C-alpha cells in the first residue's frame, strides 16, 4: 500500500477536486499570476454572492479550484468496475509532472478522491489543472 495515501477516509465522504462553482462548494485554490494554483490554508464554503461575483469575466472554474462531493456513478469519469475516478489517472498520464511539483499543503487532502486513489502523484499533477482544461482534454476519457 502506498503510505502517502490517506487512510481511514470514508469513501462516501470523498470530495471531487474538479467541482463547479456553486453555493456550498469548497473553494480551496486560486490561480496566481503565473497560472499556477495557490492552495488555501483552509477551504472556504462559497455562497451565491461569491458565485455571482466570480462568474464575471472568465468562468470561475478557470480561476479557482472548487471541491464538492464526488457523485461517483453520476459522473461520466467514474469507473464502476474499479470503483474509482478515471479522470485523475488520465491527468497524471497526460501531465506526467514530477512529485516535487506537489504542493506541500492542500486543505482538502484528507478528503480528496484523487489523493485517496493516487497519493502525492495526484497532487503533483493537480496544480496545472483547471476544470476547463479537464473538460477539453479528458471529456469521454476511458476510465
Ligand atoms: S468520479 Fe472523479 S471527476 Fe467525477 S465527481 Fe468523482 S472525483 Fe470528480
Ligand atoms: S490531488 Fe492533491 S493537491 Fe489536488 S486537490 Fe487533491 S489533495 Fe489537493
Image: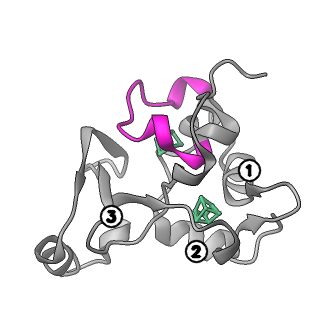
Tell me the crowding category of disc 2: few under 14, some 14 to 19, or many 20 or more residues within 10 angstroms, Cα based: few
Front: mark 3 or 2: 3
SS for dot 2: helix
| Residue topped by disc 3 | 25
Q: Residue furthest top?
A: 3
Classify mark 1 as within 8 Å of ligand 1 or not, answering yes or no.
no
Which part of the image, by quadrant, shows the N terminus? top right
Q: Is residue 98 above or below residue 122?
A: above
Q: Residue at x 37, y 46 (%)?
A: 36
Q: Residue at x 75, y 48 (%)?
A: 93
Q: Residue at x 73, y 22 (%)?
A: 2
Cβ–Cβ under 8 Å for marks 3 and 2: no
| Residue 89, label in figure | 1
| Residue topped by disc 2 | 135
Which residue is at the front of the view, 96 or 81? 81
Residue 127: image x %, image y %? 47, 44
Relative placement, left or right, of 40 versus 67 is left
The magenta span reads 98-114
Amino acid at each position: 500500500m502506498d503510505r502517502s495515501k490517506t487512510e481511514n477516509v470514508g469513501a462516501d465522504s470523498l470530495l471531487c477536486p474538479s467541482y463547479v462553482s456553486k453555493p456550498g462548494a469548497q473553494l480551496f485554490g486560486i490561480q496566481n499570476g503565473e497560472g499556477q494554483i495557490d492552495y488555501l490554508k483552509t477551504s472556504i464554503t462559497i455562497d451565491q454572492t461569491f458565485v455571482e461575483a466570480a462568474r464575471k469575466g472568465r468562468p470561475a472554474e478557470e480561476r479557482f479550484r472548487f471541491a464538492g462531493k464526488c457523485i461517483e456513478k453520476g459522473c461520466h469519469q467514474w469507473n464502476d468496475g474499479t470503483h474509482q475516478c478515471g479522470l485523475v489517472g488520465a491527468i497524471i498520464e497526460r501531465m506526467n509532472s514530477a512529485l516535487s511539483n506537489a504542493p506541500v499543503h492542500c486543505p482538502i487532502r484528507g478528503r480528496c478522491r484523487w489523493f485517496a486513489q493516487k497519493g502525492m502523484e495526484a497532487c503533483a499533477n493537480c496544480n496545472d489543472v483547471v476544470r476547463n482544461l479537464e473538460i477539453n482534454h479528458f471529456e469521454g476519457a476511458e476510465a
